[in-house]
Image (cartoon, rainbow, N blue to C red):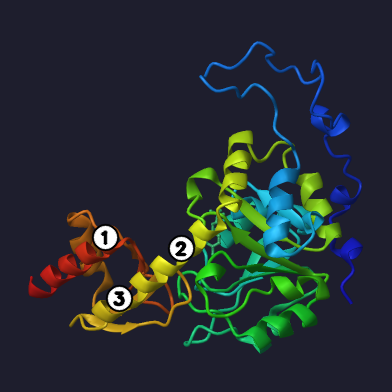
Amino acid sequence: MFDLNKILRDNIKVLQPYTSARDEYKGTEGTFLDANENAFGSATSALHNRYPDPLQWEVKNALSAIKHISAENIFIGNGSDEAIDLLFRSFCRPGIDNAITTPPTYGMYEVSANINDIVLKKVFLSTDFELEVDNILEAIDENTKVILLCSPNNPTGNCLNTNAITKIITSFDGIVALDEAYIDFAANKSFLPILLQYPNLVIMQTFSKAWGMANLRLGIAFASKEIIAILNKVKPPYNINGLSQKLALEALQNEQKKNQYVENILKQRIWLASQLISMPFVIKIYPTDANFILVKTIDGNKIYNFLTDRVVIVRNRSAVKLIENCLRITVGTETENKLLIETLHQFALS
Ligand SMILES: Cc1ncc(COP(=O)(O)O)c(C=O)c1O
């Protein structure tokens, strides 16, 4: 049985969080002499002299309406990377506890675990990039606190099997963090509508992909109110700056723009795949539910270097186990994709 109190680190249980001036007085009108701000103004043309809302309620309320989940089930982080880091810091004792990932997957899970001195157990995906559920369950020991799953998975592009994800969530007494950064591009549905059936599930999404706002660093975690309260307690007080909050609100009021981007990217994805598959040096393109395509080639390094020399930059995954000689290609605009294909034709002739 999952027991949040049992897996929470003792120091976090007793932690008295920092209370900011804006936590203590929540009104918006008044003479604010409580936060040591510069009351005269800012060194910029627009005013930025006041601290932002530490809990970003306006953004969360707007997100709540779109995602059909209470604002109290939402955490907003400085990128999804902040949520990953906070999960490790809240639940894993450095040097003692461990987490499980399923490579090949998003590299930041391992970096974040290393930073936090958390042992990372790697249970590789199968050759068709599905979860090896039995191996994952076998890898769990008394100190395993977090399992990180990524669906659609980066860099393979596929959604993980839904029953396999569910089996892991229901068999594990720790936190399952399901990273859905690319879910807007997927045919499969998000786990979000059933999130609250699982007290140990944390779903991560981001403004960096479909919403087109990677520059602002806005990641989202959805979970039980109790888990969200823990993340809020551990995070830096003003983790999302006021400009990012303002722009996030603007984006959420323009959801149709995001939907249009997704539609365009999906169209371009089909075109790009159709071109790539006909290239003589392409062995295989993998099915994708994301805004990128993983391509198996006869010589990944050579193609990568040829493209880079012509300033067409893709991600070289040639040295990664299970995806040797693979390139991960982000779907660009029509012009960018055509340029890529033209350059690859030149490689074929070289
Ligand atoms: C699977 C996955 N999760 C999260 C992220 C990063 O998201 P953010 O920009 O919100 O930190 C990426 C970025 O490439 C990703 O591939």
Q: CA distance from mark 2 to mark 3?
A: 17 Å
Q: Residue at x 30, y 74 (%)?
A: 272
Local secondary structure at mark 1: helix
How many C-alpha atoms fall within 10 Å of the one at disc 3: few (<14), some, or many (≥20)?
some
Q: CA distance from mark 3 to mark 1?
A: 12 Å
216 or 314: which is nearer to us?
A: 216
Mark 1 vs ligand 1: CB below 8 Å: no
Q: Is residue 306 left or right of residue 331?
A: left
Q: Amino acid at mark 2?
A: Gln
Vertical placement of residue 296 versus 7, above or below = below
Vertical placement of residue 25 versus 179, above or below = above
Residue 81 percent coordinates (x, y): 60, 53
Residue 120: quadrant of the picture: bottom right
Q: Earlier in the sequence, mark 3 or mark 1?
A: 3
Residue 261: quadrant of the picture: bottom left
Q: Amino acid at mark 1?
A: Glu
Q: Is residue 190 left or right of residue 201?
A: left
Residue carrying label 3? 271
Residue carrying label 2? 260
Residue carrying label 1? 336
Nearer the camera: disc 2 or disc 3 = 2
